[in-house]
Image (spheres, grey):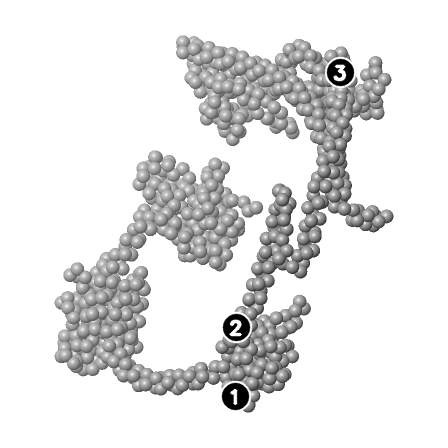
C-alpha cells in the first residue's frame, strides 16, 4: 500500500507535487508551532505562578529576617554599650583614687560576668592582640584566640555587629551566633555581648507582619500563611493558632507534615474546601526561617492561574484555519508559476544533450532567469571545454611522438602497451609497431644482467615509483648499451599493478665520460701524493710555529686555571716529546712555588720550591746549567747528574709568578745559535709570554666571578648564582626526568639575635649555620644564601620522601648540634623548613622554590622549629 502511494505521488505533475508538499509542510509547521506556542505559554504561566508565589514567600522571608536582625543587633548593642559605660565608671573610680586599677578591673569583671543574655548568652572581653581578658569560662582567661576568624574580625573592627556559626565543645552541630562589641581603649578591652540568634525569637512581634501577610492574595482564593515546624499556624487568614500538623489531602497524604519536614521547596496536592464540590490541584511554595522556626508558605489553586490558557487555545485554532486558507490560494498560484518554466528547461536540456550550441531565451526575471543564464553559461563552457580537450589531446600526441626520451607503457606481464618512436629508435627497431610486436617480455629480452631484472622487481614491490635506475640493455642486433629508467606503477583498488609508465634514456656516452673521469682522478691522486710528501716536509718545518698559535688559542679559551694547566701539559709534550719538565706557580700567601703541571717520562724531584732555590728566580731572567756541574746549579737540580736544565721565570708586573723548568739531553748547555738550549730557550720565551698574560686574565676573571656569586659573610653561593644554576639545571632535569627536592630554610627569631646581642652576633649565627649546612649536604647539591636569614638547598636526584627525610635531619641537626657562644652566653638556634619537590609539584624549579617558600611561612605560622612539606595529590 505504501509503495502504491509513493508511485502515485511520483506520477503527479510537479505543480501538484509542489502544492501537496507545501500544503503538508505548512500544516505540520502550524501544528508544530501551535504546540510550541501553547507549551511555551503554559511554561511561562507556570513559571510566572511559581515566580509570583516564590517572590512573595522570599519577600516575607527577607522582611522577617531583616526585622529579626535589627531586633537582635539593637538588643546586643544596648547590652554592650551599657557594659562599656559600667567599665568606664569603674575606670573613673580608679582615677579618683577610690580603687586600685586591679580592684577596679575585678569589680568591673564581676558585674560583666553576672549578666546573662537570653538563655545561654554572656559577655566577654578581648584585648587588641586576641587574648581573653574576661570570660565566664576560667579556662579561656589568658588564652590567645587569633586562630578563629571571628576573633580576627573583632581585632580589626573593635566596634560593631558580627554573625558567625559556633558549636560548644559538647555540641555536634554549629548554630548561628551574633555579637555586638564596643571598645574601651583605656584597658584595651573589646567588650562583646554574644548569644545564639535562636534565643531572640521572643523579640519578634507577630503583629508587625500579620496584617501584611494576610493581605496577600493569588488568583481568586490564593493566600499566604506562616507555620512553625510543629505544624502550628502562626499567621493565617482564618485558622491562626491551630495545629494542622496531621491534616491530610483528598488522597490521605499528610502534606503539612511533609512541609514541616522539608522546610524549603514546593509541593502540589489535591484539595477541596468545605463549601466546594470539586477537588482541585493546589500549589504551595515555602521557605524556612531557622532563627524563628517559621515556615513561610504561599499557596493557590492551579486552575485559577491556568485560565488564560483556554483563550490561547481558541485563538490558535482560529488563526490556523485562516492561515490554511491563504496558504491554499498562494501555493496553487506558485506551483503554476514554477511548473511552466521548468517544462521549458527540460525541453532545452533534452535538445542540448547532443548539441552544445543549444541556448534558451526567457523574458522573465528572478531566480528562474538566473537558472536560464546558468544553463546558457554551462553550455558555453561545455562547448569551450570540448575544443580545449581536442587541442590538448593533439598537443599530448605531439609531445609523445617528438620527445627526445623514450616514453612507454607496459603491462605487468612485461610487454609494451604503447611506446613513442624514440624508444623504438634507441632499441634499433624500425617503428613502434615493430617494437611492440617483437618485444613481448621486456625483462627477458632487454636486460643483459639477471640481477638487474630482480632488482627492478624488488623495488616495485616496496615502492610504486623508482628513478635513475641504470642498467645495460640489448638492442635488436644484440649489441649492449647503457640506459636510465624512471618508472611509476599504477595499481587497482586491490593494490595489484594494472600497468607501468616510464621514461627510457640512452646514457652510453655519459658512462664513457664517467670512465674517463675516473681514470683522470686516479692520475690526479698519484700526483697529489707526491705533492703531499713535499707539503709534509714544509709542515714539519712550521710545526713549532703552528703549535704555538694553537696552544695560545686554547689557553685563551680556558675558563679556569685547571683547564689552562691541562692544556699546558698536553702541548708541552707535543713541543718536547722526548724531554721532561714542569711548571711551578707562585702561592702568594706562602711565598713559595708549587708544581702544577709536569710532563715527560721522568718525574721531577721538586714539588715545592723556595724563591732562593733557583738562580732564574733570584736573577729574574732565564738560567741554564749542566746537571753534571754542581758548582753553579739550582738547588732543585742537585739530584740530576746528566743532561741540561733550562729555568725560565714567568714575569708579570715586574714580579715572578711562575717558573718553567725544562730538561733536555746533551752536554752542550751553551746559548750558541744552533744549540739545543737556544732552540728550547726561544720556544719557552714565546710560551711564557703567552701564558703570563693568559693566566693573569684567568685569575682576574675567577676573582671577579667569585665576588659576584659568593656571599662574603657565609662563604655560600648567593641568589645570583642560584638563578643562573637553575637555568642550567632546568634543561638537564627536563631531559633526564630525575627528581629534585627544594628546601627553604629560615632562622627562627633571627631579629631577636640582632636586637638583643647586636648585628655581630647575627653574623656569627649566619656564618656558623652556613658552615654546618655545607658539612651536611652533598657536593652535587646546591646550597646558597637566599637573602637575609633565609637559605635554599636544591637536592639533585632526590625523591620526595628522601627530601622530606633530609629536611627533618637538618632541622634536628641544627637544633641539637649548632652550639654558639656569644659574650659568655649559650645561644640556641632553630630553623623552620619548607619542602617542595619535582615532579610531584611541577617541573618549573622557580615555581617549586616559590611553593617551598610558602611552606616555610606555614611552618612559622604553626610554631617554628619544624618542617612543613607540600602534600602530594
Residue 58, horizontal then vertical, whole percent: 65, 21
Question: What residue is at 75 percent from the left and 35 percent from the top?
Answer: 328
Q: Mark 2 to mark 1: distance in Å?
A: 28 Å
Q: Between residue 245 and residue 700, name the one nearer to us.
A: 245
The label number, if any, that marks residue 221 in the structure image:
3
Residue 119, located in which quarter of the rendered image? top right
Helix or strand or loop: what does disc 1 sit on?
strand
Q: Mark 3 to mark 2: distance in Å?
A: 99 Å
Helix or strand or loop: what does disc 3 sit on?
loop
Q: Which residue is mark 2?
A: 399
N-term-proximal mark, 2 vs 1: 2
Callout 3–callout 2 Cβ contact below 8 Å: no
The mark lying in front, picked from 2 and 1, is 2
Measured along the vertical axis of the image, is residue 806 above or below residue 565? above
The label number, if any, that marks residue 803 in the structure image:
none
Q: Between residue 316 and residue 724, name the one nearer to us.
A: 316
Callout 2–callout 1 Cβ contact below 8 Å: no
Callout 1–callout 3 Cβ contact below 8 Å: no
Q: Residues within 10 Å of mark 3 (few under 14, many from 20)?
A: few
Question: What residue is at 68 percent from the left and 24 percent from the top?
Answer: 48
Q: Between residue 103 and residue 312, name the one nearer to us.
A: 312
**Is residue 847 something one can see in this rendering?**
yes
Question: Is 785 on the left-hand or right-hand side of 421?
Answer: left
Q: Which residue is mark 1?
A: 480
N-term-proximal mark, 3 vs 2: 3
Residue 520, located in which quarter of the rendered image? bottom left
Residue 271, horizontal then vertical, whole percent: 81, 21
Amino acid at each position: 500500500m505504501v509503495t502504491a502511494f509513493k508511485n502515485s505521488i511520483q506520477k503527479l505533475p510537479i505543480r501538484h507535487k509542489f502544492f501537496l508538499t507545501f500544503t503538508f509542510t505548512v500544516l505540520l509547521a502550524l501544528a508544530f508551532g501551535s504546540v510550541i506556542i501553547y507549551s511555551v505559554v503554559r511554561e511561562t504561566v507556570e513559571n510566572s505562578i511559581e515566580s509570583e508565589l516564590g517572590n512573595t514567600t522570599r519577600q516575607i522571608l527577607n522582611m522577617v529576617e531583616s526585622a529579626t536582625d535589627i531586633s537582635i543587633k539593637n538588643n546586643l548593642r544596648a547590652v554592650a554599650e551599657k557594659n562599656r559605660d559600667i567599665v568606664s565608671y569603674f575606670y573613673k573610680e580608679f582615677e579618683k583614687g577610690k580603687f586600685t586599677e586591679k580592684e577596679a578591673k575585678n569589680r568591673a569583671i564581676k558585674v560583666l560576668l553576672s549578666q546573662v543574655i537570653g538563655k545561654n548568652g554572656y559577655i566577654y572581653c578581648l584585648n587588641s592582640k586576641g587574648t581573653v581578658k574576661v570570660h565566664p569560662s576560667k579556662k579561656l582567661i589568658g588564652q590567645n584566640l587569633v586562630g578563629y576568624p571571628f576573633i580576627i574580625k573583632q581585632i580589626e573592627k573593635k566596634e560593631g555587629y558580627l554573625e558567625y556559626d559556633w558549636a560548644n565543645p559538647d555540641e555536634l552541630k554549629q548554630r548561628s551566633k551574633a555579637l555586638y562589641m564596643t571598645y574601651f581603649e583605656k584597658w584595651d578591652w573589646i567588650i562583646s555581648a554574644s548569644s545564639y540568634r535562636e534565643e531572640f525569637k521572643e523579640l519578634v512581634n507577630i503583629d508587625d507582619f500579620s496584617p501584611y501577610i494576610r493581605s496577600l492574595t493569588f488568583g481568586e482564593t490564593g493566600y499566604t500563611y506562616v507555620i512553625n515546624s510543629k505544624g502550628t499556624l502562626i499567621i493565617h487568614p482564618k485558622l491562626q493558632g491551630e495545629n494542622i500538623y496531621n491534616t491530610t489531602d483528598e488522597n490521605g497524604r499528610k502534606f503539612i507534615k511533609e512541609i514541616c519536614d522539608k522546610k524549603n521547596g514546593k509541593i502540589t496536592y489535591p484539595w477541596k474546601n468545605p463549601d466546594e464540590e470539586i477537588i482541585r490541584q493546589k500549589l504551595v511554595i515555602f521557605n524556612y526561617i531557622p532563627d524563628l522556626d517559621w515556615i513561610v508558605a504561599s499557596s493557590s489553586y492551579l486552575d485559577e492561574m491556568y485560565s488564560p490558557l483556554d483563550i490561547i487555545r481558541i485563538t490558535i485554532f482560529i488563526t490556523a484555519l485562516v492561515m490554511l486558507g491563504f496558504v491554499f490560494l498562494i501555493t496553487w498560484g506558485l506551483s503554476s508559476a514554477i511548473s511552466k518554466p521548468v517544462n521549458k528547461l527540460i525541453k532545452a536540456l533534452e535538445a542540448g544533450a547532443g548539441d552544445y550550441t543549444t541556448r534558451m531565451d526567457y523574458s522573465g526575471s528572478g531566480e528562474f532567469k538566473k537558472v536560464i543564464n546558468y544553463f546558457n553559461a554551462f553550455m558555453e563552457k561545455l562547448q569551450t571545454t570540448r575544443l580545449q580537450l581536442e587541442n590538448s589531446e593533439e598537443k599530448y600526441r605531439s609531445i609523445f611522438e617528438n620527445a627526445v626520451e623514450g616514453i612507454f607503457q607496459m603491462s605487468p606481464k612485461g610487454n609494451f602497451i604503447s611506446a613513442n618512436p624514440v624508444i623504438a629508435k634507441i632499441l634499433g627497431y624500425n617503428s613502434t609497431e615493430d617494437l611492440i610486436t617483437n618485444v613481448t617480455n621486456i625483462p627477458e629480452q632487454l636486460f643483459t644482467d639477471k640481477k638487474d631484472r630482480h632488482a627492478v622487481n624488488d623495488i616495485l614491490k616496496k615502492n610504486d615509483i623508482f628513478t635513475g635506475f641504470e642498467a645495460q640493455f640489448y638492442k635488436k642486433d644484440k649489441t649492449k648499451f647503457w640506459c636510465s629508467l624512471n618508472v611509476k606503477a599504477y595499481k587497482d583498488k586491490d593494490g595489484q599493478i594494472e600497468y607501468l609508465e616510464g621514461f627510457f634514456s640512452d646514457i652510453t656516452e655519459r658512462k664513457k665520460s664517467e670512465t674517463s673521469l675516473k681514470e683522470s682522478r686516479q692520475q690526479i691522486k698519484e700526483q697529489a701524493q707526491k705533492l703531499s710528501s713535499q707539503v709534509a716536509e714544509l709542515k714539519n718545518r712550521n710545526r713549532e710555529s703552528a703549535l704555538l698559535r694553537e696552544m695560545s688559542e686554547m689557553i685563551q679559551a680556558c675558563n679556569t686555571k685547571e683547564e689552562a694547566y691541562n692544556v699546558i701539559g698536553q702541548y708541552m709534550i707535543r713541543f718536547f716529546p722526548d724531554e721532561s719538565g714542569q711548571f711551578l706557580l707562585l702561592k702568594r700567601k706562602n711565598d713559595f712555588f708549587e708544581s702544577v703541571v709536569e710532563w715527560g717520562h721522568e718525574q721531577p724531584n721538586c714539588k715545592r720550591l723556595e724563591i732562593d732555590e733557583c738562580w732564574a728566580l733570584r736573577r729574574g731572567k732565564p738560567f741554564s746549567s749542566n746537571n753534571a756541574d754542581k758548582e753553579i746549579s739550582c738547588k732543585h737540580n742537585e739530584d740530576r747528574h746528566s743532561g741540561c736544565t733550562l729555568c725560565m721565570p714567568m714575569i708579570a708586573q715586574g714580579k715572578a709568578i711562575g717558573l718553567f723548568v725544562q730538561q733536555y739531553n746533551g752536554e752542550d748547555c751553551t746559548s750558541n745559535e744552533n744549540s739545543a738550549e737556544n732552540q728550547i730557550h726561544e720556544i719557552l720565551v714565546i710560551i711564557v709570554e703567552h701564558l703570563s698574560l693568559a693566566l693573569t686574565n684567568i685569575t682576574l676573571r675567577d676573582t671577579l666571578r667569585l665576588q659576584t656569586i659568593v656571599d662574603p659573610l657565609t662563604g655560600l653561593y648567593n641568589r645570583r648564582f642560584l638563578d643562573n644554576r637553575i637555568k642550567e639545571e632546568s634543561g638537564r632535569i627536563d631531559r633526564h626526568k630525575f627528581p629534585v627536592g627544594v628546601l627553604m630554610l629560615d632562622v627562627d627569631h633571627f631579629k631577636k639575635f640582632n636586637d638583643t646581642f647586636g648585628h655581630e652576633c647575627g653574623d656569627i649565627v649566619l656564618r656558623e649555620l652556613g658552615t654546618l649546612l655545607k658539612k651536611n649536604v652533598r657536593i652535587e647539591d646546591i646550597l646558597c644564601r637566599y637573602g637575609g636569614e633565609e637559605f635554599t638547598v636544591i637536592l639533585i636526584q632526590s625523591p620526595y620522601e628522601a627530601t622530606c627525610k633530609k629536611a627533618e635531619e637538618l632541622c634536628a641537626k641544627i637544633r641539637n648540634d649548632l652550639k654558639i657562644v656569644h659574650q659568655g652566653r649559650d645561644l640556641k638556634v632553630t630553623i623552620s623548613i619548607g619542602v617542595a619537590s619535582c615532579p610531584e609539584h611541577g617541573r618549573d624549579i622557580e615555581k617549586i622554590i616559590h611553593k617551598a617558600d610558602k611552606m616555610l611561612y606555614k611552618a612559622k605560622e604553626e610554631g617554628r622549629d619544624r618542617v612543613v612539606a607540600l602534600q602530594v595529590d
